[in-house]
Image: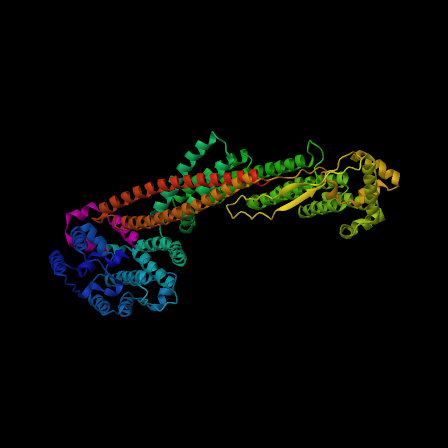
Amino acid sequence: MNLYQNNAFRVLGLLTNATTAEIVARANELKIKNSMDFDGGYEYDLPWLGPMDRSEENISSAVQRLEDPVRRIKQELSWFWVQNDVDRSAIKALTNRQPNVAADLWLKASGLKMSDLAAKNITPLTTPDALTALHNLFILFQSTLLRNELMAKEDEAINLLNSPTSEEDWAISLKIFNFLYDNPKFWDLVKKRMEAMQDRRLQTISLDEIKESALNNALSAHFYLITQALSSKDLPMLDKHIEILENANMPVDLYKSGLNLVLNSRIANINSLCDEFVRERKVLETKGDGAQYKSLFYKYRDSGKQLIDDCKLVDRKGMTDFVVTREKYAKSFHQLSWKLNKCGDSLGALESMNEAYKNLYSDALRLECEKDAERILQDAVLQYSSEATKLIHPSNGQAPLDKVLDVKDQYLEHVHSLFTIGEVFMTDHLQGLLREVVIKELKLIAVEVHDKYQAYEQANGVMKEAISWAVEAKNDAFKNELETIKRSWVAEVSPATKTEINQSVAIKSKVNPVLAAAFGVIMIIVIALALKVSTEVVSKTPVPPVKTPTIVSTSPEEPSQPPAKVAISQPVVSGNVNPPSQIPTALAASGVPLAAIAREVPPSVQSISENVPAVIVDNQLRAQANKVKAQIERDKQKIKEMEAVLDDRTQEMDRKQKELDVLNNKMGTYPDSPEYNYWVSEHNALVRENNEANVKSKELYQEYQTQFQRHQALIAEYNAKFAR
């Protein structure tokens, strides 16, 4: 907005035909008014365009811009020309806050009608007066539209053409400029204005440089609004002006340089992040710690997310330097994914590969990323299948059925996570390969459960899951094979056994008569044998009360309260009793079939050990547990405090980033300003402050990570020591 609001002619309250003497006299007058705190306006202030800066520094800057002939011609190209009576009448209307009247006057002078502006191309007159009117019309359009975008809430928008949307007015403004830019007769007028100054300094600049400056000025309003919209996250404004520029048929190089100016500071910050990312990753390579690699991934993904998203919002066609920076950022995550995979963290490797993939721009690199992700997915599914198989077939005896089914559930949970995280890389062919591995594993588990545990229902359930995977894979051969096995199991089950299976719930709630008789015989034999050996009975000795220890979760939450004490007393009998090995013989003698008992006892009862030692937790152990719990609570509070400090620092960094954006805009919009060196100095100082703050934030973040890991380790120690 400074392009028009603080144009040198407007600051001094003069027209573009002002002489050098008039300029100097007006500047002295304004300085005297400032010293007397007198705030008097001038006829050509045009206050409806918004406030202007008439500080002593800006007055001096305006004089310097107009004393230099090169800078003066650039200022004239950004303000109204007065060549004839029509121009004077239109300017008079502007001073009376009647911009619509001025627009009508200049439209007629250019030979255009209101309806002509809606055409794809305009064909105005090309006389000197018509071209001057067209120039003034462009300045009026763009300055007014820019004022509307940035006006205060209490102000009303100025509608010059009664268009339904401002996008149409912006497009018309650029359409007028394009006509002038491509018309040699208009630049002949500019050349005559330069010659009329009779200043040798103008010989150092060509007309092409003046044209490029005018083009920059025409687009700078849009780039300024894009910068403002990006800082305030005003997406409608951002989308509108990017679309206007994309449809304006402007030179690509100029469009690219303007967008680079908008994204300059963000691109620099992303490059800095990438360099730090690589350095920290190389430090970790000697340790090979998967948890630290994962922490590094989250740290830099979160640090760069907002910067990357901002750049994507602006550079939608890959025109700026962000393309190269984005690829650099993506490659860092691509390399990290292999480190995570090597450490056995397949899910983490896929997360890192996803981050790389969505930031890649080159098709060749995307293809490489897809192939690497396929290899990670295949390795991961095979790894999980191997782990499941090892757990199902332990080297030391047969695992309980519940353990086998838990392994199956964990296996499917891992596989589903892989399919979800790696969804972007899942081709039909790859899905088919991975599903085949899963189907084979589920088939193996189902057969294991059926053959070794004779658990028909559970085996049938696992087989159904395998069949559903075969259906999703559209693999009819696998599906038919699994259904054949399932039918064979049904055929093996006798009608009586089928009835027992269907009534399993009833069996659990009601004791089978045969089982009751068997246990009755056992008790009779045991008592009889005990009475034969001795009649001496030892008095009952109470066992100390057993208290279930408190379990602490792996997340820093409130530990659960321990249950009430339960006292257990047990008689100790002296003398000899039948050992367990003699009980089957006694049962056989009593005529109770062993097969009947084995069939009626649920699998969970069969797998329970006969010798379960009592757990004794004394007061000293409980006191230690309470002490560790108290430390966990203190650590949790400290972590919350550190998170609050990190949030505050993030907000401070965002504020400094906005200040940098403002300075970048000033430096790009007014490279010839006498304040340019001051802005550069201020910009560099702010960058240094920002870098120092960034280093401190990283140190604090590392301290936070250390504290959090210590907290997690303490929780793990508590669970291992006191939650048995």
In this picture, residue 16 sits left or right of residue 238: left
Question: Which residue is more in the foreground, 138 or 226?
Answer: 226
Who's the residue at 33% across and 56% down the image?
178
Q: Position of residue 324 (x, y in %)?
A: 41, 41
Q: Is residue 321 visible?
A: yes
Q: Position of residue 364 (x, y in %)?
A: 50, 39
Compared with 385, 465 (above or below) is: below
In this picture, residue 36 sits left or right of residue 684: left
Query: What is the quadrant of residue 142 in the picture?
Result: bottom left
Question: Which residue is more in the foreground, 304 or 7?
Answer: 304
Q: Is residue 327 visible?
A: no
Residue found at the very far top of the displayed protein: 286
Q: Position of residue 165 (x, y in %)?
A: 39, 65
In this picture, residue 643 sits left or right of residue 578: left
Question: Which residue is more in the foreground, 228 or 186?
Answer: 228
> What colouring does the structure picture have?
rainbow
Who's the residue at 85% across and 37% down the image?
586
Q: Position of residue 224 (x, y in %)?
A: 32, 54
Query: What is the quadrant of residue 580 in the picture?
Result: top right
Q: Looking at the rendering, in which quadrant would you find the N terminus?
A: bottom left
Compared with 602, 189 (above or below) is: below
Residue 167 magenta = no
Main secondary-structure element of the magenta-colored stretch: helix
Residue 214 magenta = yes
Q: Looking at the rendering, in which quadrant would you find the C terminus?
A: top right
In this picture, residue 78 sits left or right of residue 287: left
Number of numbered callouts drawn:
0
Who's the residue at 60% across and 36% down the image?
379
Q: Which residues are magenta?
A: 189-217
